[in-house]
Image (cartoon, rainbow, N blue to C red):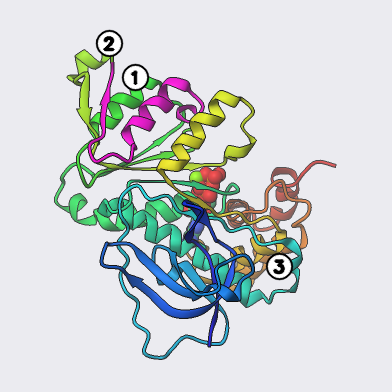
Amino acid sequence: MAVIEIVEGVYKIRGEDTSVAGRRFELVEQFRAGTDGVGYVTVNGASCPGFPERKIRIRCQGPRSYTVVEGSLPVSYEPVKSSEPEGVMSLVQTKVPDAVIAHESDETIIERTRQRFEVLKDMTKAVKEGTVRAMIVTGPPGVGKSFGVEEVLNKDDLFDQIGQRKPKYEVVKGAMSAVGLYSKLYQYSEKGNVIVFDDCDSVLLDDLSLNILKAALDTSKKRTISWNTDSRLLRSEGVPDKFEFKAGAIFITNIKFENVRSKKLQDHLAALESRCHYIDLQMDTDREKVLRIKQIVTDGMLDSYEFEDIQKDEVIEFIMDNKSKLRELSLRTVLKTADLRKSFPTTWKSMAEVTIMKRG
Ligand SMILES: Nc1ncnc2c1ncn2[C@@H]1O[C@H](COP(=O)(O)OP(=O)(O)OP(=O)(O)O)[C@@H](O)[C@H]1O
Ligand SMILES: [Mg+2]
């Protein structure tokens, strides 16, 4: 028998899709893609308080949507490809209580974090393939959100780049007006395209932009967006005042939706969230962040610096020793430290104290 912990999945409670991320159940049957195209893992509801005392199906993306926390999986296990119907909301909530983390082994934490990033990659692939229409990715700065998404989109786009066709995705960063958004959505409206709004929070905090996005990502079969006022910009760019949006969208942001103050915006964001898959790559404790850093460095993040092993270790050691003093404990800070280590072989530590540490 195996006990699994759900990383991402929903169960209908009183007719409402409810996230069961973080819950543990006895596994009855591995992930399966159902006949109606919905994927699920079957578990024993009686093994988790508050669930019906029978076999229940947790709807999820794929076999990576849960981890085995006790026992092991049957040896004959073959992952089955999930197919997710359009517009189904699923929540990937990853908050594990600090008290639990304190008792976990390094391996468990590394594995869980790795799995979350695998879910991020799988979902990005699904957006690219058009099985998932949209997702929102949140999490602390510098942990690899943009990297994870772009890695997948770049890989899938290699063919197009070689063939010199127009790339099928674009990453939009920084500020964007509502009319700019409308025009951009038109440019990438074809099936198979993906628009990534990376730290492009102006579109998430503007009334008009949010209305456009809501129309673009609606769960109805046909998603028509229109622009009702005359716009010289749109006319000059040949953008029609109405079009069908068939592409996918990914939002990467540090905004915590629940912390937005304005009630009106909150309602808007909730409407957007309900149209999107939501991945929270929360890593709250320093321990989680440190372990992630170590893992990514082991995987080769600093290879391009061509450091000797000892130099690489020095960089990591410096980060570990000063983790509570850093402005930001993140992969980005490691890269900054590595830059300094490379450029200033003798004075890098004092340089780092000035540039990447908090004052005082
Ligand atoms: N798996 C990885 N392998 C190698 N480098 C990585 C990996 N993940 C992230 N990085 C590098 O770490 C840095 C921070 O990553 P990234 O920009 O993806 O963070 P982010 O979570 O998007 O941060 P922000 O919220 O501030 O935009 C980047 O320079 C990126 O290239
Ligand atoms: Mg980013």
Towards the viewer: 3 or 309:
3
Establish if 268 lies above or below 346: above
Q: Residue 291 lies in what quarter of the image?
A: bottom right
Q: Which mark is residue 101?
A: 3
Towards the viewer: 160 or 66:
66
Establish if 99 lies above or below 188: below
Going from the N terminus, do you reach mark 2 or mark 3 first? 3
Q: For the residues marked 1 and 3, what is the alpha-carbon distance in whole angstroms?
A: 45 Å
Going from the N terminus, do you reach mark 1 or mark 2 first? 1
Query: Circle 2 sits on which residue?
Result: 231
Q: Residue at x 77, y 44 (%)?
A: 358
At which x and y percent is residue 301? 50, 63
Towards the viewer: 334 or 30:
30
In-image side of 70 versus 100 (left or right) = left
Query: Circle 1 sits on which residue?
Result: 179
Observer able to see residue 185: yes
In-image side of 223 versus 60 (left or right) = left
At which x and y percent is residue 100? 72, 68
Q: For the residues marked 2 and 3, what is the alpha-carbon distance in whole angstroms?
A: 54 Å
In-image side of 231 versus 276 (left or right) = left
Towards the viewer: 237 or 185:
185
Q: Residue at x 38, y 21 (%)?
A: 178
Q: Residue at x 64, y 69 (%)?
A: 49
